[in-house]
Image: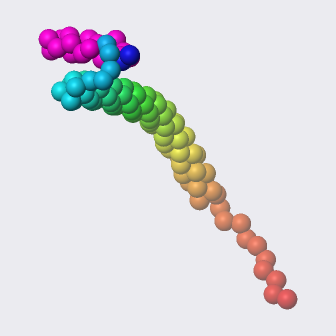
Amino acid sequence: QLRLTEEEKRLPAQEGVTLPADLPLTQAEERLLKKVRRKIRNKQSAQDSRRRKKEYLDGLESRAAACSALNQELRKKVQELEKSNGSLLRQLQALIKETSTKPAQTGTCVLV
């Protein structure tokens, strides 16, 4: 008894050929069965390849979105730090100006 899957039964029927249900098979029938099984394996392989490619692209898209969000966050942080730096620089300049306008203090230096 020859056991065929539904797919193995369907493909020869599409081509207008039938495989017998009993063994032994003739050489032509064996070649046809091998051809059908190869087509099924190729089809499955192509489906797996498309699935893996889709998963890979989905992963890349999610990584790109995460990187884009992080980039935006870091840009905001840079702006805040630049603003803070400018403020501190103005404070420093004001302190320098304030100390430079005061009269110099005299001190004593002792050499031991």
Counting from the top left corner in percent of width and height, residue 68 is at 41, 32
Q: Eyeballing the image, is 96 above or below 21?
A: below
> In front: 92, or 106?
92
Q: Eyeballing the image, is 67 above or below 95?
A: above
**Residue appearing at x 79%, y 77% in the figure:** 108
> In front: 84, or 19?
19
The single residue placed furthest to the front in the displayed view is 24
In reply to whether residue 14 is colored magenta, the answer given is: yes
Counting from the top left corner in percent of width and height, residue 107 is at 76, 73
In this rendering, would 86 be left or right of 5? right
Counting from the top left corner in percent of width and height, residue 30 is at 25, 27
Exactly how many numbered labels are in the figure?
Answer: 0
Q: Quadrant of the N terminus?
A: top left
**Residue appearing at x 54%, y 51% in the figure:** 93
Q: Quadrant of the C terminus?
A: bottom right
State the extent of the magenta-drawn residues as a range.
3-20
**Residue appearing at x 46%, y 31% in the figure:** 66
- Whether residue 18 appears in this view of the structure is yes
In this rendering, would 78 be left or right of 41? right
Counting from the top left corner in percent of width and height, residue 49 is at 33, 31
> In front: 103, or 91?
91
